[in-house]
Image (spheres, rainbow, N blue to C red):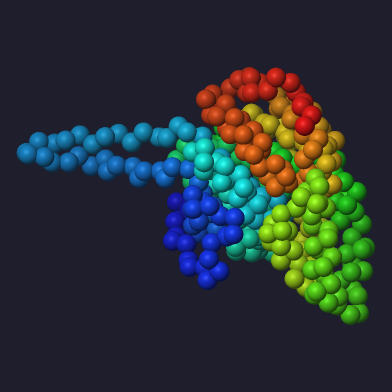
Amino acid sequence: MTATQRPAPGTPAGPHPTDPGDIRVSYRRFAGVRTRVLEVGPPVAEPEDRVPRRGLGKRTPARAHTRPTAPRLVLLHGYCDSADTWRPVLALFAEAGVPAIAVDLPGFGEAQPLRPGPMLPQLDAFTAAVIREQAVLGTVVLAGNSLGGTMSLRAAQNPRLPIAGVASIAAPGFVDSWLVRTVAKYPLPLRLYSALPLPIPGFLVRAVAEQVVPRLLYADSATADVEQVRRFTALFPDYRATTARLEEARQLVSELATAYQLDSVRVPLLVVVCGKDKLVTAASGRQLHALVPHSRLLVRENWGHCPQLDDPIELSELLGYFAAGVSRTRRTDNVTGLFGQDTAAG
């Protein structure tokens, strides 16, 4: 077994403010990591017992269990994010009856922390366990934003994983912004920050984060959702936590240098480029598209780094159509019927 179901523990704070009743919350283990799962769509019926039954002295053959064929979207979040980033999209999937789950990746949200050492192999094992669990229930389509896009691409590189298609949204590691490159190549600012003789007061750290976070994640910071911004800034409560997150980011960016083996990607791939992304440039998505010849490229000029926050309605429709298309057939050629052009400006 790759995962075990656990009942959701009681939360004194009550349900999430933006959580409709159709989003089910549970706690499971994947690759030994306990995490939180947000899930929508019709509950999957348990397979019937295959043991023959006796009735009036005769054996009644048990019904054969039929594997579900409906596509199941697995949504992966980015660095310093959590499954909560997908709540607006999940709510729309719930209304449409689309089965989907979002999970807290190890080290983020309510998941257990990452162990010391390389981060990407740990995230690979976790993602593979989620895929294998969901593949029992239906055709798996991965959609990942930022770090989640990286994990989706790395999963697609593994031919042993049962994946029907991947949508990669703003995956880093190709042509990143000056900010990401600075974190990777010039750690001096991080060292200076951590070596300050007096720690910066927590209230000042949070005040700065409240100004910076909306500008990095949204296309237009004026439209930022207060609850989503508060969730991000909670990750930087004080000087020590901020220093740890920055050092972790530096390690992750360094690992991205050897993260991809794109010639191994055989499944349909949709590359989503966000024109107003301040962390991963549009050139990065175009390079990914060029490196995977059978991929499709979709450009949305009015989206920021997290389109699930900027435009959940259009993104949910896009992912729903993509999942429905690739689940009908696993032949790469058929995915070209989903879009009329290689690029589309929003």
Residue at x-position 92% and y-position 69%: 192
Vertical arrangement, residue 312 with respect to residue 326, above or below: below
Farthest residue, direction bottom: 198
Horizontal relation, residue 180 to residue 259: left or right: right
Q: Is residue 161 visible?
A: no
Horizontal relation, residue 289 to residue 47: left or right: right
Task: Give the percent coordinates (x, y) of residue 240.
Answer: 78, 73
Residue at x-position 77% and y-position 40%: 303
Task: Give the percent coordinates (x, y) of residue 260.
Answer: 74, 40
Quadrant, the C terminus? top right
Front residue of 342/345: it is 345
Vertical arrangement, residue 301 with respect to residue 212, above or below: above
Task: Give the percent coordinates (x, y) of residue 299.
Answer: 77, 32
Horizontal relation, residue 26 to residue 318: left or right: left
Residue 258 found in image quarter:
top right
Residue at x-position 50% and y-position 46%: 40
Q: Is residue 325 visible?
A: yes
